[in-house]
Image: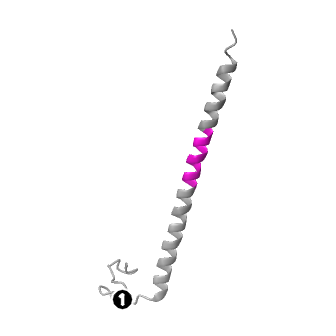
Amino acid sequence: MECPACKGNIPEGAKFCPYCGKNISEKMRIRWWALALLAGAFTGAGIFLAYQLFQEKRLWDAQGKETSSSSFEDNLDF
């Protein structure tokens, strides 16, 4: 964990920073976990949206191949 005052590395469960002596309250830990959870949710949503876009592109490409091959066969009138 990182000290909010001096940015020193604090061992988990410490109540005071060993470098600057700042009181590390439970509120800071909860806020850190809330931010980590929020970042994870945004990351998951971004991955899900990227996956959906790739799926949509794959369907779009497959649809384009079907229509282009059928229109090519229709234009073979001699």
Dividing the picture into quadrants, the one containing residue 60 is top right
Q: Position of residue 28 (x, y in %)?
A: 46, 83
Label 1 sits on a secondary structure element that is: loop
Residue pictured at 51% horizontal, 62% vertical: 43
From the image, tell me which residue sits under label 1: 14
Q: Position of residue 67 (x, y in %)?
A: 66, 30
From this view, report whether residue 78 is shown above or below residue 17: above
Dividing the picture into quadrants, the one containing residue 3 is bottom left
Q: Position of residue 26 (x, y in %)?
A: 46, 88
- At label 1, the amino acid type is Ala
Q: Of residues 2 and 60, which is closer to you in this image? A: 60
Residue pictured at 56% horizontal, 57% vertical: 48
Taking the magenta stretch, the answer to whether it contains residue 13 is: no
Dividing the picture into quadrants, the one containing residue 4 is bottom left
The N terminus: image quadrant: bottom left
Please indicate whether residue 62 sits to the left or right of residue 30 in the image: right
Q: Counting other residues with Cα less than 10 Å from the Cα at mark 1, is it few (<14), some (14-19), or many (20 or more)? A: few
Residue pictured at 35% horizontal, 79% vertical: 6
